[in-house]
Amino acid sequence: MTKLYAGVAAAAIAALLAGSAAWVFLGRSEERFAGCGANQVAGGAIGGPFTLVDQEGRTVTDREVLAKPSLVYFGYTFCPDVCPFDMARNAQAVDILTEWGIEVTPVFISIDPKRDTPEQLKFFAEAIHPDTIALTGTEAQVKAASQAYKTFYRVQESDDDYYLIDHSTFTYFMLPGTGFVDFFKREDTPEQIAERISCFANDSHVSTSFDARAQKSYQASRGKQMGDNHG
């Protein structure tokens, strides 16, 4: 892994920038959020049902994972620097929002099911933020989730397991009962992300849009699994 991190960082950044530049949004945030500075995007819808596996090895659905406001990011744990940086930034935004009394879950969906096992994702998630939900699945499941969110990724050819993946680097803000609301680019700071999300949270329609039953069920199951692992 050290060899990968040291030798391919520059190539990864160039490839990621190229991939992101070629990617086009195909969704639209609701007009009632226009006052919060939500990014306006045109065409189809972003987000949709998925079935994946979390870092505890548990099969979960989008309804369980996105049971409260969430920041969703697609990447891979062997990413040299972009993915860890973006997820760390998202975690900082989550901490700022927590101080303001707003709960948001950082979600990481792997586009590298071959290497990103639940065990690998657990190590990665714990290093990012204690509330991180990290997801993987079969190649078909990951592809379906990626297509639902209109993300781009492409595995570079390699003769060994030290391959890179070109991918888009946007973070999506999702609300239960509403779905996609806004997206954030790499240049957005934790403070900017928190400010925009706080505006949505202050909307009376948003503050009550929690799927409490799904959240309680999943969090209880997740807590039990974590307890068993430490027992």
Image (cartoon, rainbow, N blue to C red):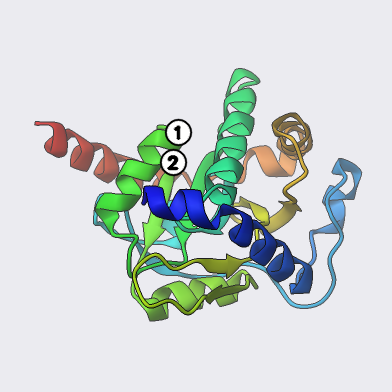
- Above or below residue 15? Residue 37 is above
Query: Residue 9, percent across and down?
Result: 57, 53
Q: Amino acid at mark 2?
A: Thr
Query: Residue 76, percent across and down?
Result: 46, 58
For the point 63% across and 53% down, which residue is it?
Answer: 174
Q: Amino acid at mark 1?
A: His
Give residue 88's quadrant in the image. Answer: top right
SS assignment at label 1: loop
- Between 231 and 111, the residue placed more toward the observer is 111
Residue 10 seen in the figure: yes
For the point 63% across and 70% down, which residue is it?
Answer: 151
Q: Is residue 228 left or right of residue 100?
A: left
Q: Is residue 191 left or right of residue 209?
A: right
Give residue 200's quadrant in the image. Answer: top right
- Between 88 and 25, the residue placed more toward the observer is 88
SS assignment at label 2: loop
Q: Residues within 10 Å of mark 1 (few under 14, many from 20)?
A: some
Image disc number at residue 129:
1
For the point 65% across and 54% down, which residue is it?
Answer: 172
Q: Residue furthest top?
A: 99
Query: Residue 203, percent across and down?
Result: 77, 38
Q: Is residue 47 left or right of residue 18?
A: left
Q: Are marks 2 and 1 in contact (CB under 8 Å)?
A: yes
**Pointer 2 residue:** 132
Residue 102 seen in the figure: no
Query: Residue 33, percent across and down?
Result: 83, 49
Q: Residues within 10 Å of mark 2 (few under 14, many from 20)?
A: many
Q: Is residue 75 left or right of residue 60?
A: right
Q: Which quarter of the rendering shows the C terminus?
A: top left
The Cα atoms of the two marked residues, 2 and 1, are separated by 5 Å
